[in-house]
Image (tube, helix red, strand yellow):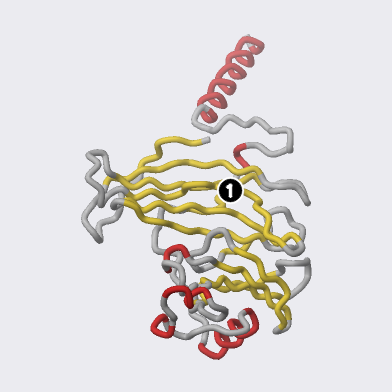
Amino acid sequence: MAALMLSRLAILVALLLALAGCNREPYSRSNSGFSSLDKKIFYDFRPHGQTADAEVDVATTRKILSAVFPSYLSTLRACQAGAKANAPGQIVPTLRGAAEGSFTAAGLKQTVYLIDVGECSHDPVVSTRRLVVFTAGALTANVEAPLGAGNLRTYDLNGDGKNELLLQGGHAGRGEWIEVARLVEFDKDKLATVEDFGQIYDDTCDTDDASRSISASVVYYLPPPAGQKPRFTVELYRAPCLAKGQPLQWTRVSGK
């Protein structure tokens, strides 16, 4: 009788454990030694308006721009017209973002600035951009940036002591607003892409599309072993267009 009761008790305990775990995410480790339960949020692109221009004082702005450009203009009204717009110094640069960290080498105290060059010969929308790094007040690196919308965000995902930078940029067309993002790092005298996230935000609310909506990505990553590149995963969310000021109602539509 005692053996029968122990057997029934063991079955009951097994059933309770199974029920307790039925709603949990399956735990399976990858080759890197991490499971999907270990993933951490990298960036949530659903909240909008987070890329406002950085506020840098006038004196610092003048110092940075003068170190990067031999000559430049302070207003668009000073731009020359026609062929003269391509002459040296025919630019109206704007400092768009800044961040502290170690960018060109581990252990250095550096500041990186994102600059819109503002060529007089270009439409401001297609102005080229520069990422410049200063160490102890001296210009250390000066490279072209593929994207740029202010408020640089820094990371050290692989633990090598150097910071990566998350760049975000957008463009409009026929009422649609699209944004893309890329994680980059300095590699000697050039900029290297760590991960290209592609399109991370799409707002079609001002179009005539009957299915207009807003979609945005939430990016996760698995912490990698030291010195290795992290693995990213993306969840896509969508929200119906609502009146201005109303909170968006997001629904997850896919994940990978």
Name the one closer to the observer, 166 or 86: 86
- Residue at (48% x, 59% y) in the render: 169
Give the image location of residue 227, x and y in percent: 78, 51
Asked whether, in this view, residue 140 is left or right of residue 69, the answer is right
Asked whether, in this view, residue 89 is left or right of residue 177, the answer is right
- Residue at (52% x, 47% y) in the render: 198
Give the image location of residue 167, x and y in percent: 55, 59
Using the image, determine if residue 72 lies above or below residue 249: below
- Residue at (55% x, 90% y) in the render: 59
Q: Which residue is denoted by mark 1 in the rendering? A: 196
Give the image location of residue 241, x and y in percent: 26, 49
Name the one closer to the observer, 249 or 100: 100
Instruction: Name the secondary structure under disc 1.
Output: strand
- Residue at (60% x, 72% y) in the render: 99
Using the image, determine if residue 44 lies above or below residue 253: below
Toward which corner of the image does residue 70 lie, by quadrant?
Answer: bottom right
Marks counted in the figure total: 1
User: Which residue is outermost to the bottom?
Assistant: 59
**Quadrant of the snapshot with the N terminus:** top right
User: Are there few (<14), some (14-19), or many (20+) residues within 10 Å of tag 1?
Assistant: few
Asked whether, in this view, residue 221 is left or right of residue 78, the answer is right
Give the image location of residue 33, x and y in percent: 73, 37
Residue type, numbered disc 1: Asp
Name the one closer to the observer, 66 or 121: 121
